[in-house]
Image (cartoon, grey):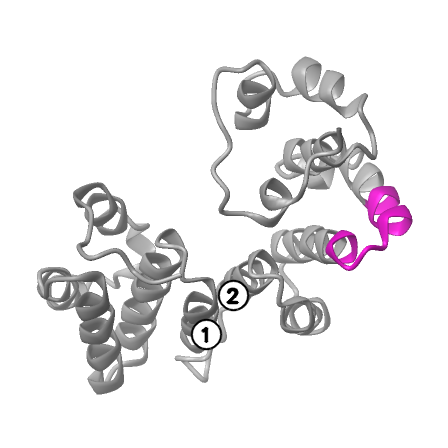
């Protein structure tokens, strides 16, 4: 899949609304100007090339991390999953003193969506073995379960997903886990659980026919059980 010929205005707006923590206060103006300048470079290929060059030339760790994260987000939203995974991973390493494991999981998500399961699994295992933040570990465990499902280990993957969905620590991920089980046919009754317990979730909106599914994540790319 190649980039579209031009950067879509809605995509520019979405990217410029990336969380403010990506922009340290002392550098926000300078980095913002770099990003805005690159976004005006022309086609998506040219924008990506400009951002890559800016990241390579950036002297500060925080600035390099911001530019690489911005580039990876652009690529992921444009369907360029493998370049996005590469740049998320590079961004996670940009500050040797403070590795960002959240970005490493973003890279794993892209590898999983691209069906590059060994790379996805390797990154998730790195987080599980090295990170200490419980929310990161919860997210990594969910990704590990989705990887198992992608590898064809339906029995163990579905058991993990059901266990996680019943665990309050995984409440933020429960609708997506249950939706996976419903969509794949492994647990048709998961539909009722979503509608009753998470009625305002995006998954519930899909189940009610109020929203559609955008094929950007593994569990929505998988074949639906008839």
Q: Position of residue 140 (x, y in %)?
A: 66, 58
Q: Is residue 34 magenta?
A: no
Residue at 85% x, 48% y is: 154
Task: Tell me if 21 is positioned left or right of 226 in this view.
Answer: left
Q: Nearer the viewer, residue 75 or 33?
A: 75
SS of the residue at dot 2?
helix
| Residue 155 is covered by the magenta coloring | yes
What residue do we see at 66% from left, 65% from top?
A: 132
Residue plotted at (83% across, 37% down): 162
Along the viewing direction, whichever of 1 and 136 lies nearer the viewer? 1
Label 2 crowd bin: few (<14), some (14–19), many (20+), radius 10 Å: many
Q: Is residue 77 left or right of residue 196?
A: left
Quadrant in which residue 144 is drawn: bottom right
Mark positioned earlier in the residue sequence (2 or 1): 1
Residue at (59, 40) in percent of width and height: 220
Q: Give the position of the N terminus as an image quadrant.
A: bottom left
Q: Which residue is mark 2?
A: 107
Q: Residues within 10 Å of mark 1 (few under 14, many from 20)?
A: some
Identify residue for label 1: 86
The boundaries of the magenta stretch are 148-160
Q: Quadrant of residue 115?
A: bottom right
């Amino acid at each position: 899949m190649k980039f579209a010929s031009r950067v879509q205005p809605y995509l520019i707006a979405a990217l410029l609304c990336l969380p403010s923590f990506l922009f340290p206060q002392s550098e926000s103006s300078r980095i913002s100007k770099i990003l805005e300048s690159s976004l005006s470079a022309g086609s998506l290929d040219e924008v990506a090339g400009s951002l890559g060059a800016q990241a390579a030339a950036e002297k500060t760790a925080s600035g390099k991390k911001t530019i690489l994260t911005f580039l990876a987000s652009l690529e992921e939203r444009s369907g360029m999953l493998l370049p996005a995974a590469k740049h998320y991973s590079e961004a996670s390493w940009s500050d040797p003193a403070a590795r960002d494991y959240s970005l490493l999981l973003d890279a794993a998500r892209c590898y999983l969506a691209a069906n590059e399961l060994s790379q996805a699994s390797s990154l998730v295992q790195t987080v599980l073995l090295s990170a200490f933040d419980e929310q990161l570990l919860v997210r990594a465990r969910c990704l590990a379960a989705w990887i198992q499902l992608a590898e064809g280990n339906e029995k163990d993957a579905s058991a993990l997903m059901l266990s996680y969905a019943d665990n309050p620590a995984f409440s933020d991920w429960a609708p997506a886990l249950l939706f996976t089980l419903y969509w794949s046919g492994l647990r048709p009754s998961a539909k009722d659980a979503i509608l009753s317990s998470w009625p305002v979730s995006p998954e519930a909106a899909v189940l009610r026919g109020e929203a559609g599914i955008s094929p950007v994540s593994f569990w929505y790319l998988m074949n639906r059980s008839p």
